[in-house]
Image (cartoon, helix red, strand yellow):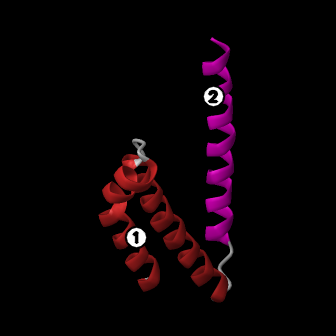
Amino acid sequence: MFLVLIVLIIVIFSAKFIANNYYHKPIFWALIAGSLYIFSLSFVNFLEDLFFSVNKFKETFYKEIIFQIFRLSLILIMVFILMK
């Protein structure tokens, strides 16, 4: 977790520099969103591993059900939006 936090802090503070000097494109907000996504994903994976270590699989099962329902509904929403 500490390594992830260090990398996140580095990416967040250097996002404007990377966006302006290397790519010359407006990717500043994408870098910020990506770093927040990496943080949330690593936190969820940490909790999932913690539940696995104490043999509690019900929480991971519920997380996967919510994730798959969200993913399927997001695909359906995008199809309906793109068909209009």
How dense is the environment of label 2, judged by Cα within 10 Å: few (below 14), some, or many (20 and up)?
few
Query: In this orientation, which residue lies closer to the viewer: 12 or 56?
Result: 12
- Magenta-drawn stretch contains 75: yes
The amino acid beneath tag 1 is Leu
- Of residue 33 and residue 62, the one placed in the foreground of this image is 33
* Residue numbers of the magenta segment: 58-84
**Residue 17: where, in percent of width, then height?**
32, 58
- In the picture, measured across the screen, residue 73 lies left or right of residue 38, that is right
Q: Amino acid at mark 2?
A: Met
Residue depth check, mark 2 versus mark 1: number of the one nearer the observer: 1
Rendered location of residue 7, percent (x, y):
42, 75
How far across and down, in percent of the image, does residue 64 sit? Answer: 67, 59
Q: In the figure, 16 relative to 41: above or below? A: above
Quadrant location of the C terminus?
Answer: top right
Quarter occupied by residue 76? top right
| Callout 1: SS | helix
Q: Is residue 7 left or right of residue 65?
A: left
According to the picture, the residue beneath numbered tag 2 turns out to be 78
Total number of numbered labels?
Answer: 2
Q: Which mark is residue 37?
A: none
Foreground residue, 79 or 9?
Answer: 9
User: In the rendered structure, are the residues bearing label 2 and label 1 in contact, judged by CB atoms less than 8 Å apart?
Assistant: no
Compared to residue 35, the image places residue 20 above or below, namely: above
Give the labeled residue for mark 1.
8
